[in-house]
Image: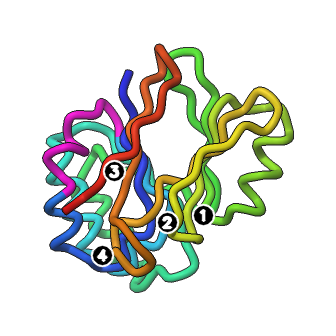
Amino acid sequence: MKLAILSDTHDNLWALRSAMPRLATADVALHCGDLCSPFMLKELGQGMNGKPVHVVWGNNEGDILLMTRIVAQFPNLTLHGALAELKFDDMRVALNHYPDIARGLAASGQYDLVCCGHSHIASLTKVGECQLLNPGEIMGLLGPRTFALFDTATRVVEFVNVL
């Protein structure tokens, strides 16, 4: 199974639209927070063509009430709050926005993959047996716009640059 992991889109609708064709090749999308505006959820829901999209809150979410109303229009969208605990194939996956919290989750030994955002910097490290992944940012504030593709069968990560 292929997971598309993204974070920190910060209302950059144009960059998200540029990323969507490649994101949509995945079986599932995981967003690690800081969408900011409700229209970003709509773009993800439509762009993934009915495939599941799991979202956790970041520290810059806007109109949460409107976001929940948009999610109600897209059965493939799920809002998890601050933490998502998911399972894909035999992999235990956690999503959170903050790297410090994600590092603790990874160190707990309960997960095979922990994904976070917030720093806007793409990184992949091992914490014990767990892969700790930050896909970078779609926004483009601190450098290249990136997201990650993760293959659950091979456990290989590919960072994708977004033009």
Q: Nearer the viewer, mark 4 or mark 2?
A: 2
Q: State how far apart marks 4 and 2 are (Cα).
A: 12 Å
Q: State how far apart marks 1 and 2 are (Cα).
A: 5 Å
**SS for dot 2:** loop
Question: Disc 1 marks which residue?
Answer: 97
Residues under numbered marks 4 and 1 in contact, where contact means CB atoms less than 8 Å apart: no
Q: Residue furthest front?
A: 143
Answer left or right for 47 relative to 93: left
Q: Quadrant of the C terminus?
A: bottom left
Q: Quadrant of the N terminus?
A: top left
Tag 1: amino acid: His
Label placed on residue 77: 3
Q: Earlier in the sequence, mark 4 or mark 1?
A: 4
Q: Earlier in the sequence, mark 3 or mark 2?
A: 2
**Total residue callouts:** 4
Answer left or right for 133 relative to 102: left
Residue beneath the point at 36% across and 44% down: 29
Residues under numbered marks 4 and 2 in contact, where contact means CB atoms less than 8 Å apart: no
Residue 123 drawn above or below residue 61: above
Tag 3: amino acid: Leu
Q: Earlier in the sequence, mark 1 or mark 2?
A: 2
Question: Disc 2 marks which residue?
Answer: 33
**What x and y, as percent, mark residue 65?**
41, 79
Tag 4: amino acid: Pro
Q: State how far apart marks 3 and 2 are (Cα).
A: 14 Å
